[in-house]
Image: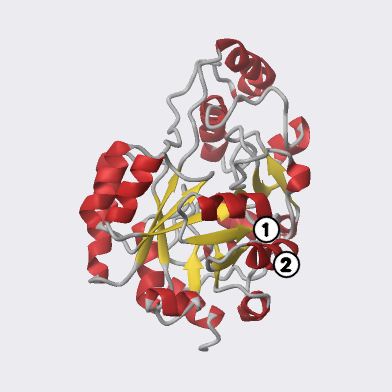
Amino acid sequence: MTLAQWLDIPFSIIQAPMAGVQGSRLAIAVSTAGGLGSLPAAMLSATQLHAELQALQVLGGKPYNLNFFCHQMPADDPARLAGWQTVLQPYYQQEGLSAAPSSAAQRLPFNQEMADMVSHYRPAVVSFHFGLPAPALLQQVKAAGCKVLSSATTVAEARWLEANGADAIIAQGLEAGGHRGMFLDMDLDTQLGSFALLPQVVAAVKLPVIAAGGIADAAGIAAAMRLGAAGVQLGTAYLLCDEADTSALHRAALGRPQAAHTALTTLYSGRPARGIVNRLMRELGPRHPAAPAFPLAAAALAPLRAAAEAQGRDDFSPLWCGQNASGCRAVSAAVLTRQLAGQT
């Protein structure tokens, strides 16, 4: 069964949820065009999430995906945070800043308040990154009639998700932009490319499998479907769309030849995520041992990012991007979705 058949939508295409570069506008455009639009909720307060969900009601019953993180918040580690501040101190001095802790937005794990909102709005699909939430919360989501997706970066994670209540699995290849969904093992050597991971996951589980990572056009989608995918999830391809909130600096970076050079970095959040290599990643190395645990690394970088961006520099900005940015085009999300589906 294809994703389109499973959700009763025209196209087996999911627009990947991308926190920080999109809101409901992009999700609405994709769902209206016949794909499955996604809203990232991990960085939204309850008030913000409620407002975005209200906006999504314009879809009039068309399916959309509501995405959450389900990580465990780390214990306070003042020594680790102080060490990170020490590493960053030369940059603070260069920017004329004090090293005071920042109140940067945190990525929040799925909790009871979010589960209650799901119960109220009943989205067709709820997806999770970093595993699945506690059984009681997961059961509440299922009781609301939502189909549950979660990301697997290995065959072992796919089997775990199947055994613990997922309804479909997103096989996230190493090429994908943004945060790795890895949750059973944080060893990057376990991570596989999309077209190595996908057929192994398809063979290992009985659930529908959605391919993600490095897919940028209709030909890539067709290749994934031939390997057994029920559908595909694409994020990077949508970054330049009219309805995306991608910053001007991020858009400019995507248009440069350097966009082909990405790396997995822990500098911006404390967890491996793929983005375009910029000054901070070059000078500290993409994965620095002093970076605090996810999601705490972001706070100390927030003042540096703000100062540099105010001067038109992306030195300290997370420029999330997959390994294949060739599908990025400055068009409406509806046009792109139809092109990806081979309709234009």
Side of 114 relative to 251 (left or right) = left
User: Which residue lies most toward the bottom here?
Assistant: 344
User: Which residue lies most toward the top here?
Assistant: 79
Residue at (49, 53) in percent of width and height = 18
The image quadrant that residue 6 belongs to is: bottom left
Of callouts 1 and 2, the N-terminal one = 1
Q: Quick check: 211 above or below 221?
A: above
Nearest the camera: 146 or 269?
A: 146
* Residue 19 x, y percent position in the rendering: 46, 48
Nearest the camera: 8 or 155?
A: 155
Scheme of image coloration: secondary structure
Label pair 1/2, CB-CB below 8 angstroms: yes
Side of 289 relative to 295 (left or right) = right
* Residue 299 x, y percent position in the rendering: 51, 27
User: Which amino acid does the dot numbered 1 rest on?
Assistant: Gly
| Circle 2 residues within 10 Å: few <14, some 14–19, many ≥20 | many
Label 1, label 2: how many angstroms apart (C-alpha)?
8 Å
Residue at (27, 38) in percent of width and height = 113
Residue at (53, 70) in percent of width and height = 330
The image quadrant that residue 145 belongs to is: bottom left
Q: Quick check: 205 above or below 95?
A: below
Whether residue 339 is visible, yes or no, is yes
The label on residue 173 is: 1
Residue at (52, 30) in percent of width and height = 302
| Circle 1 residues within 10 Å: few <14, some 14–19, many ≥20 | many
User: Which amino acid does the dot numbered 2 rest on?
Assistant: Phe
Nearest the camera: 28 or 246?
A: 28
Disc 2: which residue? 195
Q: Quick check: 242 above or below 266?
A: below
